[in-house]
Image: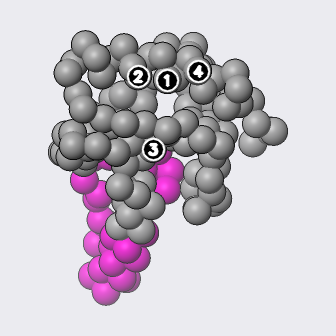
Amino acid sequence: MPDKKYTLTEAGPRIEEFLAKIFRLAGFTLKYAVAEGETPHPDFENPDLLVRFSGPDVDLLLANKAELLLALEQLTMESLGMPPDEHSRVCFDANDYRVLRIEELRMSALAAAERVKKTKTPFHFSPMNSRERRI
């Protein structure tokens, strides 16, 4: 991936403005911080920006495999006009969900590989988003 394309200076205020409007209209009690991207798993994710959420309604974001968190991430990317091939450049997280999910996927893949070796039958993962399939 080339150098950083989305900077805190350029995209940060646009992300904050969009999220503030959404949370106000939806009535969520959430705080968020936009920061330079971190790479705890550089082989899987290497975002330019990371948006971390906290607050009383964070459990709503993480319910149902973080469906709302991922939806907000997608809507934010659309509001920034990001092309699909750049969606990995901005990452949303709450309560270290992403790091824990990557570890969960890694463990599932190892267990599935062992099962396939033993049984010689194909294994099918449950449905997941495209980013999780790449991991």
Q: Amino acid at mark 1?
A: Glu
**Which residue is at the far bottom?**
118
| 126 shown above or below 70 | below
Residue tagged by mark 4?
Answer: 13
Q: Earlier in the sequence, mark 3 or mark 2?
A: 2
Residue that appears at 33% across and 78% down: 111
For mark 3, what is the residue? 52
Residue flagged by tag 4: what amino acid is it? Pro
- Where residue 39 appears, as percent x and y from the top left, is 63, 57
Which amino acid type is shown beneath numbered disc 3? Answer: Arg
Determine crowd level at label 3: few under 14, some 14-19, many 20+ residues with C-alpha closer than 10 A: some
Q: Is 116 contained in the magenta span? A: yes
Vertically, is 97 above or below 47?
below
Boundaries of the magenta span = 106-135
Check contact, mark 3 vs mark 4: CB within 8 A.
no
Q: Are marks 2 and 1 in contact (CB under 8 Å)?
A: yes
Residue 128 is a magenta residue = yes
Q: Are marks 4 and 1 in contact (CB under 8 Å)?
A: yes
Q: Residues within 10 Å of mark 2 (few under 14, many from 20)?
A: some
Q: Pinpoint residue 90: horizontal percent, then vertical percent.
A: 56, 35
Q: Give how far across and how far down residue 36 sits, in percent.
A: 65, 43
